[in-house]
Image (cartoon, rainbow, N blue to C red):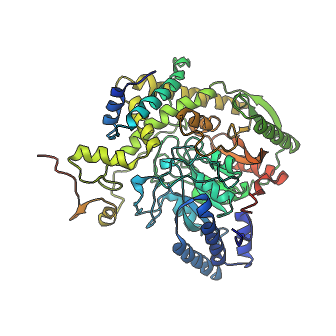
Amino acid sequence: MSALPSLPAPTVAGLARGLLNGEYSSVELTRACLDRIAAGQPALNAFVTVTAEGALAAAQAADDARAAGRAGPLTGVPIAHKDIFCTEGVRTTCGSKMLADFVSPYDATVVSGLKAAGTVMLGKLNMDEFAMGSSNETSYFGPVRNPWDPALVPGGSSGGSAAAVAARLVPAATATDTGGSIRQPAALCGVTGIKPTYGRASRYGMIAFASSLDQAGLITVSAEDAALLLGPMSGFDPRDSTSVDSPVPDYMATLGDSLEGLTLGVVREFFDKGLDGDCEQRIREAIAVYERLGAKVREVSCPNLPLSVPTYYVVAPAECSSNLARFDGVRFGHRCDAPRNLADLYSRSRGEGFGAEVKRRIMTGTYVLSAGYFDAYYLKAQRVRQLISADFARAFADCDLLLGPTSPTTAFAIGAKCDDPITMYLNDIYTIGANLAGLPAMSLPCGFAGGLPVGLQLIGPHFSEGRMLNAAHRYQQETDWHLRAPSVWA
Amino acid sequence: MSLTRTDIENIARLARLELTEAEIPVYVDSLSRIFAFVGELERAPTEGISPMAHPLPGLAQRLRADEVTETDRRDLYQRNAPAAEAGLYLVPKVIE
């Protein structure tokens, strides 16, 4: 990787400025990204599909728009999409053999919003199959590797998005978060991740996993970049019945606000025995930075939060078993050879098309929804979900934002947690709560433990993205952890 | 909680998933572990607590007028079909 071309700036904000000042064209910038992607692919496997031709055409169109005086703040900025988002005329796999040849006939609303803002799509990013995983090892297209150490996982399920941004192959990427799939890989790769409030960005064209939890978001280098990109991908969409009809604020307008008087709640349950000591130290140091910035810090308790992982592993598989029933080998997706009858067509197509973890979740969900078990498992989990949600509501009565670690440890070795699903599921112990309660949350780089990135998590009340991005941005003006890149990829 | 081979075969049949001989014992083991783990929920006191189906309180599911809003794009959609002919999806014979 001797001749790896570097990007002219690490952030979307910096690149947008360079484009505005005419320092380079979108075509030049897009070529530089495509060169880095090509160089990075053998080592990291972050992409499933690279759309070089389409990217260069879109970049040319962006340059033409700029020349004609029709450029917006994001015109010509190259980004990439997690392969869970449908992209018109481009293969959309969701990391699965089931959809290995699926070419979407339409764009997801998130994709069309970012396209309308002038961004250039570089390709589709690798992910855990159907977003089910915390290590990116369940992808049909092979594991993604962590740019800080290729023997380690990048986290998941948005592992391709996190690795591509961490290695500076792309300045920003879309991602999704059902139980931590944006925040945990962001933490493990040393980048910034935001999961907005449930319903803030449309789920239309985002392949469904667990519909009461799934939310689209971003992985970026900085909170400022997230603020720039979040507006165009958010807002009401009549095509998603759970999309929320409330105006999208100007996230850039409040980004630099003072943190004087902000109350941060440190969630006691996040500092449990599973949290690595060095990671805890980095979080304590980040809390001290916030105190210097004028924030008041107090300890809060969410006593039901330790039940969030078992609650999630009833609710999410139940919704998954229902959502994934659509893959029947008839209208699209994998079909088995020579089916003997319709039942054989369904069960063999699904048995062959889904990977091991997806089948595990479908069966878990089928069981908890089956006659005789529905009350004991599914309704019980929904009641505990109510308790967890109420814990957060109580905490927000006294605090503006909550704070804690994103993940109990730094990145772990590829293969280390594959044998026991419970060990793998516990990676998301600090992130799942926000999904169950529909809250917006972020992960920010806050230092290193043993040479590997550590993530700081912020959680806010519903629709507090503006305040959360503000708090994240002010932290990133005091620190430079978010600008650190692995030396091989810098 | 421990599941048996028969339990796994029944669940797989309900889920329309054909499992290989080698997969069955793997799922007997891992689903047993998952249900032992989620069994923790039993201890949570939830009497009088209503089940939460939607993460945003007070927001009802929105309905729309029953009107045709999509155009006919059948040919485009059927390009993704494993087998289609004359505008129809082909499946094995259902009635013998």
Q: Is residue A414 left or right of residue A187?
A: left
Percent position of residue A478, x then y: 85, 51
Q: Residue at x 62, y 25 (%)?
A: A304
Q: Residue at x 41, y 55 (%)?
A: A99
Q: Residue at x 47, y 48 (%)?
A: A130
Percent position of residue A255, x then y: 75, 54
Q: Is residue B12 left or right of residue B87?
A: right
On the image, which quarter does residue A169 sit in? bottom right
Would residue A464 be seen by someone viewing this image from the given angle? Answer: no
Judging depth in this view, the residue of A286 and A464 nearest the camera is: A286
Instruction: Relative to A122, say whether A294 is above or below.
Output: above
Judging depth in this view, the residue of A403 and B10 nearest the camera is: B10
Percent position of residue B78, x then y: 30, 62
On the image, which quarter does residue A25 sit in? bottom right
Q: Which quadrant does the C terminus of chain A fall into? A: bottom right
Percent position of residue A192, x then y: 69, 52
Judging depth in this view, the residue of A203 and A121 nearest the camera is: A121
On the image, which quarter does residue A434 sit in? top right
